[in-house]
Amino acid sequence: MSLKFNKRRRKISILGLAFFLTALVSCQKDSDNKTNSASSAEASTLTPVTQEGVTFYANDVDKAFEMAKAQNKPVFLEIYSESCHVCQSFIPVFKEEKVSDFYNDTFLNYRIEVNSPEFQSFVLGQKIFVPSLPLLLYFDQNRNLIHLATIEPSGDKLIEQGKLALDPDLRAPSMKKRFEAGEKDSQFLIDYALFSKVTMDTVSNRKAMEIYASQQPENSYASNTNYLAIQKLLMDVENPMGKYFVNHFSTFKRGRDAEEVKNVAENLIMSSLYSSFGNQYSSDKIKQMRDYMIKVEIDPQVARNRVLLPLINAYFRESTPKRAVELVNSHITQVPLKVPDYAYLLKYFNEHSPDASYVQSAEKWADNALNMAPKGSEEEVNIRMELAAAKRRQ
């Protein structure tokens, strides 16, 4: 499944991956709801979408798994993009005779375009994160993910990954046991961190990357190899490599696309801030996240905006709601709020504040909003309702 960082092992290069997808935007496509006599015929089987090489099916993942059960085969699924040049480079590989013979005999092969509605319904429905394209996934007949790979376009590598997917002792889900049993070489940790990230297992990813970072000399953190590890694998900015990245930001920009490096840093900080572990950050830690953003050249006001709600929540957790009120009162002197913003703040304090210490300020927030809301509008009604709810807490 491996990203390749260590040339002494499998020659799978992370440099052969497509761009890192930090946020995948679904393309809303028109759906044709026509029903006709052909639909019942189509329900019995799927028509291949490829004419040569690996026989791929598409557009009905449920039927694909039914076919896989009927044929007693696991499912190979390629996540790709029409605009991804690396994905396009796999097309001739899938046409190689040795590849098509192996995959057609062994798997039910399926494709999902990353901008398709099926990506939303199946891939995201399976809680699978796509860090780069193409992403090669292997499932058993019951839709359990048994292996994954991000590899260079090579017939031998593709067959290698297919064979790994068939071996319960080597395929991706075995990694947790192997990790717990003490397997800790760098390439294994990279593989395990990738699998954990794709399956959204934050705890395992953080453990693997902590050990990986400890194995790397600090003066190698800015190397191309470790920059790619930060970009593709890291989920926690507090990892030693993450901290080094933020604190030596200018070093990482040298010889690289500055905007890309900034995006990597921004995504790493934000993913940490809004993660399950970030939801438990102290107020001081959240302020540090704000400072990290400023260090990686995010506008200070934007940084303050992004930590506003996490910081309010931290003050609530720390039983210091007055500090949350002070924060909001300071914030609204710097950033002009609109009526919906005030409505949201009022509702949020009404539902989450541990006491009523905010009510006096809430009256001022409501006054600000009412001065902007059209008389008799729904906005005015919402503000008055939230103000009444606040007063009932006194």
Image (tube, helix red, strand yellow):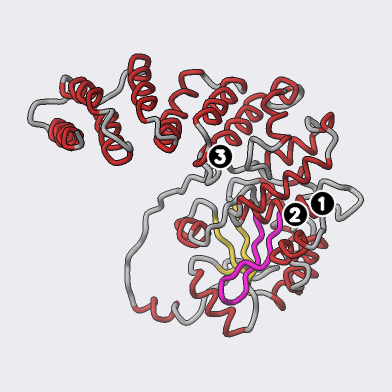
Across and down, in percent, residue 118 comes to: 47, 60
Residue 325 got which mark?
Answer: none
Q: Which residue is label 3 attached to?
A: 271
Give amino acid for label 2: Asp
Name the secondary structure under disc 1. helix
Sequence-wise, which precedes: disc 1 or disc 3?
Answer: 1
Q: Is residue 245 left or right of residue 356?
A: right
Between 308 and 57, which is closer to the camera in this rendering?
A: 308
Across and down, in percent, residue 149 comes to: 71, 58
Name the magenta segment's main secondary structure.
strand
Where's the C terminus, which quadrant?
top left
User: Considering only vertical position in the picture, is 31 above or below 327?
Assistant: below
Name the secondary structure under disc 3. helix
Going by the picture, which residue comes out furthest to the left? 376
Q: Which residues are magenta?
A: 135-150
Q: Residue at x 52, y 34 (%)?
A: 282
Cα separation, mark 1 vs mark 2, equals: 6 Å
Give amino acid for label 1: Gln
Cα separation, mark 2 vs mark 3, equals: 20 Å
Q: Is residue 369 visible?
A: yes
Give amino acid for label 3: Ser
Going by the picture, which residue comes out furthest to the right? 8
Q: Is residue 152 visible?
A: no
Q: Which residue is label 1 attached to?
A: 187
Q: Residue at x 16, y 24 (%)?
A: 370
Q: Which residue is label 2 attached to?
A: 191
Hey, which quadrant is residue 385 in on the image? top left
